[in-house]
Image: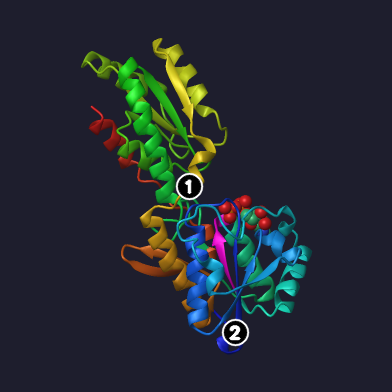
Amino acid sequence: MAQFDPKNLKTIGVYASGGDAPGMNAAIRAVVRTAISQNLKVVGIVQGYTGFLEKKFIPMDLRSVANIVQRGGSILKAGRCVDFLQAEVRKTAVENVRAAGIGGLVCIGGDGSFTGANLLWQEHKMPIVGVPGTIDNDIFGTDHTIGFDTAVNTALDAIDRIRDTAASHDRLFIVEVMGRDSGFIAVAAGLAGGAEDIFIPEHPFQIEKTVDLIKRGVARGKMSSILVTAEGQKPGRAYDLADSIRKHSGYLATVCILGHIQRGGTPSASDRLLASRIGSGAVEKLIQGQCDIMVGTSGENLVAVELSQCLKQKKHVNRKLIELAQILSN
Ligand code: ADP
């Protein structure tokens, strides 16, 4: 595990990067207030890596994070910075950060943001600790990422509402949730929402099996069904599925794409707790001179995992949960 000398650590910087996720504000609050309680100064960097380049540095005090624990999004904004893929740009970024007196950083984001953070340590020995903040839950080394639980609950709320209509009109619905490369949201919301079948990018599916499942349900007297799909690489995948089902069975499915409503909203209790614990834990690690790690959770415990491991290894969806959804929706 990478170490640095924390003796001269007087000021830490905190930033959110990539897509926003509910609970990022609770994490920022935890970072700021833990650091100040340990006599450190805190600088907020606005708009992720863009803020490094444009020197969007704002001093944070205890009151600067008042009344944000319940707010979705990120008061420091988030976002993407394509230029950060260039080594020269990263060099300028670190020079700017050091000139502002910042001796360590907390990065709240997903695997793209962690890749940038990992490079800043490797290339310039800039100490950084990662806080997993993404609704997708697709980061290796932590049970959950900040924002996932809220996103699942938002999707679930939508599924519950759609079920009312599906049941009233004897319809088949396909609900598309977020998840380009990963099906964590689809599996959790699908199973909890009583979906008949769940489609995820990691798992090839046979439409014949799904059609068979629906047909058997109809034969048992089932009048309505809901299928849940992750968007995959091509948002709008639900329309392709509906088309395929129609061709294979003649059933007409109504498509509902949830889209960006899953990214915002009031963070759930679970996400606020997670963000508070991990945000605070990240500052503790910097104070101990540990860096190039992500702080996550394993069961009840906080864990530290090397960023390189988080980036190298893939976290897998538990596919048995899809089979369970199929059985339980009987
Ligand atoms: P997330 O952190 O949610 O996965 P992105 O993948 O969009 O979101 O990454 C956020 C930002 O992290 C990018 O806009 C870029 O500034 C930085 N980043 C991503 N990949 C790299 C990379 N390979 N090298 C350097 N910086 C990167």
Q: Are marks 1 and 2 in contact (CB under 8 Å)?
A: no
Mark 1 or mark 2: which comes first in sequence? 2
> Where in the figure is residue 260, as x and y percent of width and height?
54, 40
> Where in the figure is residue 52, as x and y percent of width and height?
71, 66
**Circle 1 SS class:** loop
- Select label 1 or label 2 by which is in front: 1
For badge 1, the amino acid type reads Gly
The residue under label 2 is 9
**Magenta stretch in the rendered image:** 105-111
Q: Residue at x 58, y 59 (%)?
A: 75
At label 1, counting other C-alpha atoms closer than 10 Å, the crowd grade (few under 14, some 14-19, many 20 or more) is: some
Q: Residue at x 65, y 60 (%)?
A: 48
Q: Is residue 153 left or right of residue 139?
A: left
Q: Is residue 245 left or right of residue 287?
A: left
- 92 or 233, which is in the foreground? 92
Q: Residue at x 43, y 29 (%)?
A: 175
**Circle 2 SS class:** loop
- State which quarter of the image contains the C terminus: top left
Judge: label 1 CB < 8 Å from ligand 1.
no
Q: Quadrant of residue 107?
A: bottom right
> Where in the figure is residue 254, as x and y percent of width and height?
44, 20
Q: Quadrant of residue 215?
A: top left
The residue under label 1 is 265
